[in-house]
Amino acid sequence: MTIVDTPTDAAPTAPTGGPELPQERRLVTEIPGPQSRRLLERKAEAVAKGVGHTIPVATVAAGGGVLVDADGNSLIDLGSGIAVTGVGNSAPRVVEAVQRQVAQFTHTCFTISPYDSYVEVAEALNRLTPGDFVKRSALFNSGAEAVENAVKIARHYTKKQGVVVFDHAYHGRTNLTMALTAKSLPYKSGFGPFAPEVYRVPLSYPYRDELSGADAASRAIAQIEAQVRAENLAAILIEPIQGEGGFIVPAEGFLPALQRWANDNGVVFIADEVQTGFARTGTMFASEQFGIVPDLVTTAKGIAGGLPLSAVTGRAEIMDSAQVGGLGGTYGGNPIACAAALATIETYEQENLTERARAIGGILAARLNELKATDPRVGDVRGLGAMMAMELVDPATGAPDAALASRVAASVIAQGVVVLTCGTWGNVIRFLPPLVISDELLNEGIDIVGKALIEC
Ligand code: PLZ
């Protein structure tokens, strides 16, 4: 990496993003630099306080494994805008497809007059999601909107209302999805009342509950049978690996046992693959690695290279239950987002990014486990593929150490590496690099995290 220590006050002209950006960590000012500070001041004056930010820099370009700020700093990106830019920012196929589409037509509203790319995205999702049954898809804008619609569809199909979700779950910020999400601060506190008929049950959290998958599933199912009962239950909704909740990988057998119970009891089994989907975990969808075939899958984030798009995909008989006009929205499946999704899916497939995610996972797992072996504050290292995390704890008690996680993250960010935290207790440092990041940048990023951990 280069360190140039002549701080500049004039905004450099913004470079073009994409993989052609120099793939290097480069600090020319402190973080945040003067231009970024100026933007953050304007943000405080113009943008509602509730809309926070994690990385205090004004982004002007991004691509490959880096993000460039208005002061000319180049940061290593280990976050992908929360698992969105798996194919990299401004990925060439996406840029080309979006430019072509934006010049052709920008909007019709698919439910007013349909177009090809929406149908092609649905066909691709029906092909790529787990399960060899006949499927249908419906497209929306955000992950939360996809989850809301999956619940709507499951309720319509089963003519039942209850929805079971899990401890540590994250499903969104809309009213129904706030009810589905577990963590109060910052997502729910003060924003109630929340939607009814949502029941929360315990997860499998091997590091903390030391239960086998079968035992954790029996515990959850016993609670469902005692407190809800299948005859009142439309759906079980679960993230195969919990994302915001702390990258919690359930013990083997947990998810299949839940799915079996749902299948046997007329309950729709919904996998929320908004964060785990699209090559991230080393397979197109994480469900594949857990041996589950969900009835419905929700997707978003990695689907369209950064454009807003989401989907519900699943069994035709369930998806087709809702009446004509019952599903939709002005922008859902917008033609530009669909063009981006087709280019993104082609990129995952042509560039073999599932394999790349497994290679990234190999590097992350090896390096983070080295940290764990020498530092008892690293309580657990877990994840799949390019979705890995370490849980930081007080070695004496095992209590979550959120303060340490924020100190490490702040120090790493100040040194030009974008890293995110997560977890119900905020004590997990997560790694979600773009799948196109080089080994060199990835390793440099992890080096900095390791050093920051020692220094904090
Ligand atoms: N389901 C599993 O991870 C979004 C939220 C960030 P939207 N996770 C990032 C934040 O602070 O808002 C997410 C998810 C899972 C649903 C969602 C919601 O997706 O596109 O943010 O609505």
Image (spheres, grey):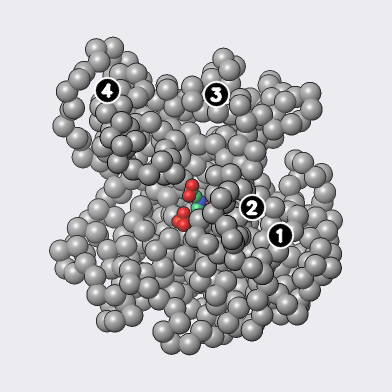
Residue lying at the far top of the rendered structure: 5
* Depth order, front residue of 110/45: 45
Name the residue rendered at 52%, 56% in the picture: 172
Check whether the beta carbons of the residues at disc 3 and disc 2 lie within 8 A of each other: no
Asked if residue 409 is positioned above or below residue 242 in the image, the reply reads: above
Which residue is denoted by mark 3 in the rendering?
A: 407
Q: Which badge, 1 or 4, is on the more N-terminal residue?
A: 4
Q: Amino acid at mark 1?
A: Arg
In the image, taking residue 289 as reference, residue 326 lies left or right, namely left
The answer for how far apart the CA atoms under marks 3 and 1 are is 32 Å
Which residue is denoted by mark 1 in the rendering?
A: 200
Q: Which badge, 4 or 2, is on the more N-terminal residue?
A: 4
Which numbered disc covers residue 34?
4
The answer for how far apart the CA atoms under marks 4 and 3 are is 23 Å
Name the residue rendered at 69%, 52% in the picture: 167
Name the residue rendered at 36%, 23% in the picture: 31
The answer for how far apart the CA atoms under marks 1 and 2 are is 8 Å
